[in-house]
Amino acid sequence: MAASIKRAFKSFRPSPALPPSISTATITTLFPTTDPLIDGDACLHDCETCTIKLPKGFKIDEDEKLYGQVNGWSTHLIVGSGKSDWVKDVTDEKGSVMEAVGKYGEVENGKLMLSASNFSGTSYDAPTTVLLLPSFTLIDDVTPSSVPTLLSTIVSKALTNTTPLHAQPILPLAPTLPTRPCPHRYLILLCSQKTRDARCGQSAPLLRKEFERHLRPLGLQRDLHDERPGGVGIYFISHVGGHKFSANVMVYRRAEAAGVIRDDSMEQQNEETGVADLGAAQCIWLARVRPEDCENIVRYTVLQGKVVKPDRQLRGGFDRAKGLVSW
C-alpha cells in the first residue's frame, strides 16, 4: 500500500523547473501546423483509402482541452518485455526491470518516464534491452539487479528533453551494460495497455497496421527485429496517461530528421571519446488518433515535424532545437 501511495504521489508531481534556456511554448509556437498553401490540399483531408475502423462503440472524450496538460518529463526509459499488455502498474510486474526501476527512486537529471514495451525479451528471468530517450540509445543485458547501475551511471548522466542540441554531453558508459545507437530515424509509440483501458488495447494494433501500410511503400517500415539503419520503429508501450483521449501516439524524431546536421568535429568526438549522438530533437505527443489520421501523421508529423490537427490532437512535447516545451 505504501509503495502504491508513493507511486501515485510521484505521478502527480508538478513539472520540474525549466532551465533558463528553455521556454514554455503555446500550441501555435511549439510545432508548425500544416498549411494547405504550403503543404497542399491533402493536409485538409483524412485518408480516403483507409479501410480499418475502430470498434463500434469506441467513444472518447472529445471536449476536454488537450494541450499543456501533460506534466514535463526529462528522460524516457522504455523496457523491452516481449509483451503488449501488463498489470495495471508496470512497476508491479514481479521480477521485472520495471519493478526494479520503481523501487529505485528518483534519478539525478529530472523526472523519468517509465514504459514497458513489446520489443525484446521473452521472460523476466533473462536479460533484456532498454531504450533511452531522448538519447536514442539502446542498452543491452539489463536485469533487475543491474538497474541501480543503469539509472545512476547511464540514465542520470544522459541528455534530457531540455538539453540544448549544441551542448551535447558524453553518454556515460557502464562496463557491464553495453550501449549502442538505436538504428531508427523515427519512433512511433502506441499505448496498448488494455488492463488500463480497453480502448488502448483495441486501437494500438489497428493503428500499427495502418501506419505500416503507409510506411511500407516509402521503404520506412521496420518490424520489431528489423535493425536496418533509418526507418520508423513502431512499438507498443504501457500506459502514458490520458486513456480517455485514446489513441495516444508519441512521435520521437532524431535531430538529423529535424534538419540538425552534425559537424565533423562532433563525429570525431563520437569516435574517439564516446560522445552520444544528437538524439531526438523533438517528441510530438498526439491523442484522439484514428486510423484515418495515420496517412497524414506519416506524411507531415513523422517526416516533417508538423501537426495536422493541433487543436484536436496535440497534447504536448518538446523541441530541443528551439528550446521549447509544452509544460
Image (spheres, grey):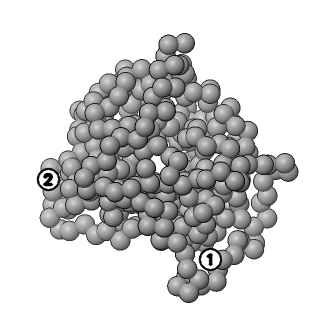
- On residue 272, the disc is 2
Q: Which residue is found at the position 45% from the left and 28% from the top?
A: 10
Q: Is residue 29 above or below residue 1?
A: below
**Amino acid tagged 2:** Glu
From this viewpoint, which residue is outermost toward the top?
Answer: 1
Which residue is under mark 1? 43
**Amino acid tagged 1:** Cys
Q: Is residue 311 above or below residue 73?
A: below
State left or right for residue 101 relative to residue 18.
Answer: right
From this viewpoint, which residue is outermost toward the right?
Answer: 56
Quarter occupied by residue 193: top right
Q: Is residue 11 above or below residue 317?
A: above
Name the front one of labels 1 and 2.
1
Q: Residue 22's spot in the image, x, y percent?
A: 30, 55
Q: Which residue is found at the position 62% from the left and 77% from the top?
A: 43
Q: Earlier in the sequence, mark 1 or mark 2?
A: 1
The one nearer the camera, 175 or 185, is: 185
Q: Secondary structure at mark 1?
A: helix
Number of numbered discs on residues: 2
Quarter occupied by residue 37: bottom right
Q: Secondary structure at mark 2?
A: helix
- On residue 178, the disc is none
Where does the N terminus fall, quadrant-wise?
Answer: top right
Q: Which residue is found at the position 40% from the left and 67% from the top?
A: 257
The one nearer the camera, 224 or 98, is: 98
Residue count near mark 2 (Cα–Cα under 10 Å), binned few <14, some 14–19, many ≥20: few
Q: Residue 63's spot in the image, x, y percent?
A: 69, 53
State left or right for residue 32 relative to residue 319.
Answer: right
